[in-house]
Image (cartoon, rainbow, N blue to C red):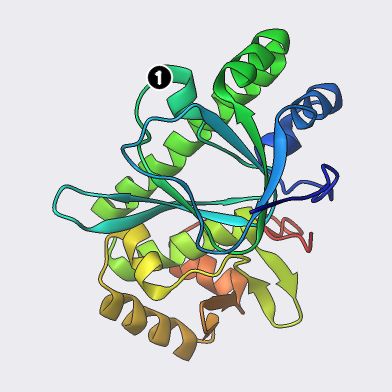
Amino acid sequence: MRRVPASSGTSPWPSGTFLKRLSEPSRQALLALGVTRTYPADHVLIRQGDAGNLVFVLTHGLVKVTARTENGKEALLAVRVRGDVIGDMAVLDGSARSATALTSAATVIKLIKGEVFLEYLRRYPSAALTLSTLISDRLRWANQRRLEFAGYDSDVCLARLLLAVAARHGRLGPEGVDLGVPLTQIELGGLIGAKESTVQKILRALSARGLVRTGHRRVIVTDLAGLTAFANLPPLPLGNHPAKPY
């Protein structure tokens, strides 16, 4: 771990992230708090079950959020990118950490003490409202995954997941829409409640249809409209592409 300049990672924030949603004054006020640190890949920022009084604001990099069940199984819950906030729930309600957060690449983060973050929310009520909206969106995401798991076969669940990840994190390139996050097949399976072998079989089938292309920890949606139809979702409005090359 080493210090980095506070200006690191100040490129435009991805759509849907906490920093993107904030007004300019409240965003600058937040980024002026705490200290800036950089961590290598595979560094545990938060461990499930631990007490914690820090909020982490990502300014560069990628973090995976996982949780382990009582029987020892571990599932990927979410992926956080630059502009996202991590650790806020434990600070808000004083509970133990509900998940583990692990860096997937070199990651630059603002570390803010819990009491300082709470005071920031009191000073900027619009930021508190933005955080509430963000938490609501996280719950909606989780509920949607549960509904799909209950109502669709694994192949449709995976197609919907790929589209959802592409919409939030995807990057448009010459081959199609890269998901933008390095997810393993085990992790994809964890998000839809399927085994790795099932995910492998589905990805092969989708690839044979010309809907996706796979590589090492990489999935590219090569036919967005086709995958949308396969997922039993309505067609996207003309020009409303889910991915931006940010």
In terms of depth relative to the viewer, which is nearer, 90 or 22?
90
Residue drawn at (80%, 28%), measured in percent from left and top? 32
Quadrant location of the N terminus? bottom right
In terms of depth relative to the viewer, which is nearer, 171 or 240?
171
Compared across the picture, whether 233 is left or right of 188 comes to right
Q: In the picture, residue 127 is in which quadrant?
A: top right
Residue drawn at (48%, 58%), measured in percent from left and top? 233
Toward the left, the furthest residue is 71
Residue drawn at (50%, 65%), measured in percent from left and top? 162
Q: Position of residue 220 (x, y in %)?
A: 59, 77
Residue 186 drawn above or below residue 137: below
Q: Residues within 10 Å of mark 1 (few under 14, many from 20)?
A: few
Q: Position of residue 53 (x, y in %)?
A: 49, 26
Residue drawn at (49%, 69%), measured in percent from left and top? 183
Q: Position of residue 146 (x, y in %)?
A: 31, 47
Q: Position of residue 8 (x, y in %)?
A: 82, 50
Q: In the picture, residue 149 is in which quadrant?
A: bottom left
Quadrant location of the C terminus? bottom right
Residue labelled with disc 1: 94
Amino acid carrying mark 1 in the image: Gly
- Give the secondary structure at mark 1: loop
Toward the front, the furthest residue is 2
Q: In the picture, residue 107 is in which quadrant?
A: bottom right
Compared across the picture, whether 225 is left or right of 68 comes to right
Residue 37 drawn above or below residue 118: below
In terms of depth relative to the viewer, which is nearer, 218 or 237?
218
Figure disc tally: 1
